[in-house]
Amino acid sequence: MSYNLTIVLPPRGSIVRELVFNAILSLANSGISQGHISYTKYTGRSITLTFLSQDHILRAFGTTIKYVKTLYKLKTERVAYRIPVHVNDRKVFKNIANLDPDGYLEGFNSMLDHYAQKLEALELSNLADVKVTGRRIVLGSGENVLLQPLAVERYETGTDFMHGIGASGKLEIKLSDEWYLLVSIGFMAEFLSYTRGEILLFSFTEDKMAEILGNFLPEYDIFMLSLAKVAGERAYATCSMHALYLLLALDIYEKLQEALTSRKLDIEKYLDKIGLLPTLLTRINYAARTFTLLERSNLELSTLLKFVHKLSQKGLGSRQRRQLEGALDRAMRGLGDLSRLGSYINFATLLHEAVNYAKDPFYTVYRAVREEVITDSRLVRGLIESLME
């Protein structure tokens, strides 16, 4: 007998809503691929997943926990991401699962182990219970406080999100264990990087997630695994967001190419099938024992991936790739001689705009050559040809 699990989404625009939606996407991805879920429905206010039976819900959650723990392993394989736990959040980890983690990533990973052992005891009906009143958002029975990196809206009293829910002053977000399980899954899926006291989260926009949920694109799984490998090999910085975007596209394309080649699939057909990729990058600063939401920027990633694909067809070698990556990495991190740094940041900005048809390709490459940011003739020719196509 089929069983419907309805999850009412938190207020639109909040980070916790984004995390929950990403968790549901991971749950649906695992559930559909393993034959646990037969139908999904998104209404804007809630999401309903139809399982083959109530037992299939527990199996799907178990599979999803294993899946995001795999993402965690890939993301921390070569880069040691340690986000120090705020003293107040140590109490939260202690109260929920008797944990004392060194960092937030380790904490969420251990939380998943904790919930994997008590899936049968969770009241999943609490996922349909969302209360928003004044300065309070209560998810489920609300016995736990949301960890501070995920509740940065509590201090954003001037934002549209706060006004939209009629809140004034500091916002309080409380949630039950069932909701913490979703938030933990969502954070592990979204985490991209942590460097210089800045957390980066990567997500598709809600409309794109709804499209993936409704059509179940198996290409989503390939993308998420590729993204996890990327996060595990490079810690992204934000001195130049344009450089970050371009490097992210270069890195994801390389991992996608590896994954698709091993499956004997064509990357050009893959990029055409997944269509537009509107994404959201969230920057959270952690300094002076305070978390601050710096920016939530939108990026249409498919345009950049298709540019990288064109560039890959130009016969460039490892030398050319190293020079391009080196220039972008220098701009992204703000490294090196300050008198030259502006040239690298300017190159990243112009190149990003040229890829999006907002700058002349010849001018973009000419400036890079004149300022000796790009010196390899094969790379110069490859950039011009790729931008002109």
Image: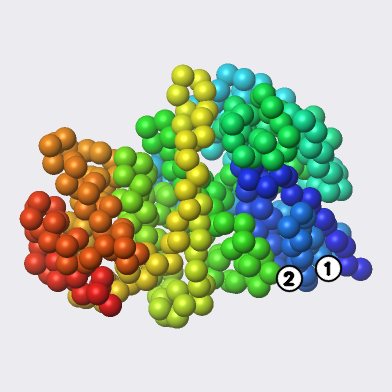
Please name the residue that numbered disc 1 is placed on: 52
Q: Quadrant of the N terminus?
A: bottom right
Query: What residue do we see at 9% from left, 53% from top?
Result: 372
Please name the residue that numbered disc 2 is placed on: 35
Residue 325 in view: no
Residue lying at the far right of the rendered structure: 1
Q: Residue flagged by tag 2: what amino acid is it?
A: Gly
Q: Which mark is residue 183?
A: none
Residue 292 image point, x, y percent: 51, 30
Query: What residue do we see at 78% from left, 71% from top?
Result: 38
Residue 384 image point, x, y percent: 19, 70
- Taking the image as shown, residue 162 lies to the left or right of residue 198, namely right
Within 10 Å of disc 1 (Cα), the crowding (few <14, some 14-19, many 20+) is some
Residue 113 image point, x, y percent: 66, 42
Residue 45 image point, x, y percent: 76, 54
Q: Residue flagged by tag 1: what amino acid is it?
A: Leu
Mark 2 vs mark 1, CA separation in Å:
8 Å
